[in-house]
Image (cartoon, grey):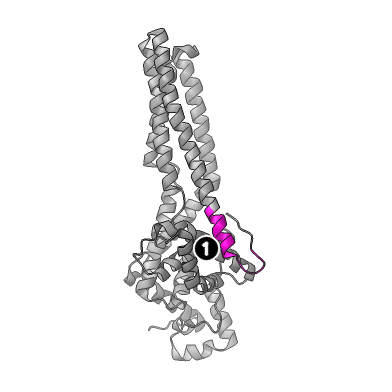
Amino acid sequence: MKKEEQFNQILSENSERIQRICRYYNSNAEDQKDMYQEVLVNIWKSLDNFRGDSAISTWVYRVAVNTSLSFTGKAFKQMKLMVNTDTQNLSSIIDDESLAEKQKEESQFNLLQTELNMLSVIDKALISLMLEGLSMKEIADVIGISEPNVKVKIHRIKAQLKTKLSGGVTHEF
Amino acid sequence: MNFKRNNDNINLDQLAGKLQKEDARYARLSRSLQIVYWIFIPLYTFLAISHYRESSEIKDLIGGLCYVIAFFIFAIFFGIYHKEYKYADYSLPTLKMLKNAAYRYQPVQLKSIWPLIAVLFMDAGLCLNESIGFSFLKVQIYFLGAMFCAVMIGLTIWYFKYKPLRDNALRLIAEIEGE
């Protein structure tokens, strides 16, 4: 298959996926398009190295997350993680029953949004992949660390968020 | 690379076309550089031999061959360097990509020894070549002085342009590996 055909096929199958990742990192529609375009350019540049060792979706997530880390249009400190109330896996962050109910309230959601934006760049990347519904193993494949390490990191992020959302009281879970 | 969008949607055909052009432009540039080096090598070999035949001085022959060896090392080194650094591979796991970036942006790498050896061969070639009329000391002052200035300029560019990128990559690596 020619490079151009392969490129077009990857895009037709993964366009939505890439757009969602871009939306996580940019609230502004123009910035989303700029990052989307940058991801496409990086997919093209990296296509010669695709060996089929991992699933194409994992490969695309890698390119998208790595692009977000080096996205030239934004400084790291300004990088924000944007989630919507209808984000499919949002409840996976706050998996506590009572907090999940509260999270529906607008003020709680705003607080969650604020706290998510205060996470470090890597933590944001981990959460964005979790919101995409990736398994711990898939996240480990994208980031390049071990599965137990991903579990530890995500556990820590969740605990940190829960503490903040419950007003500073630490919950063990 | 920056591509213009078609209103709200990205024109994929146009984008792929531009990317292909970019690839072709890069391949041309890389090939041109290689051609220049591979022209210099036989040219300097020819000049060294003809110079030796005229003067019968073995120093002229060795001096000329030092230039040839220097060009040969440069040709091989830049060929490998271009292939390796053509594009950053964004499809690697994040940690690996960051480690590659940190290595790529470090000011001195082990493979820098090759251009250094080439420079020493050029220096030896200049010292042995009596036709330029410079003493050994003068050659060292001018040539190594020029090399020193070039390294200083390179390090200044690195400090302002690439060091912040490397620092960012190292910070992210520490964050991923921490725990």
Of residue B66 and residue B168, the one placed in the foreground of this image is B66
Residue A87 vs B100, above or below: the answer is: below
State left or right for residue A172 relative to residue A42: left
Front position in the image: B179 or B102: B102
Where residue A34 appears, as percent x and y from the top left, is 60, 64
Return the x and y of residue A173 as percentages of the image width and height. Answer: 37, 84
Q: How many marks?
A: 1
Q: Looking at the rendering, in which quadrant would you find the N terminus of chain B?
A: bottom right
Q: In which image quadrant can residue A112 be found?
A: bottom right
Q: Nearer the viewer, residue A73 or A171?
A: A73
* Residue in the picture at 46% in, 20% down: B140
Residue in the image at 42% along x and 27% along y: B41
Q: Is residue A74 visible?
A: no
Looking at the image, which residue sits at the far front? A1
| Disc 1: host chain | A
Residue B59 quadrant: top left
For label 1, the residue is A40
Q: Look at the picture and state if A163 lies above or below B54.
A: below
Kind of element beneath mark 1: helix
Q: Which residues are magenta?
A: B5-20
Horizontal and vertical percent position of residue A36: 55, 66
Q: Can you say whether B160 is above or below B40 in the image? A: below
The residue under label 1 is which amino acid type? Leu
Q: Is residue A81 left or right of residue A97?
A: right
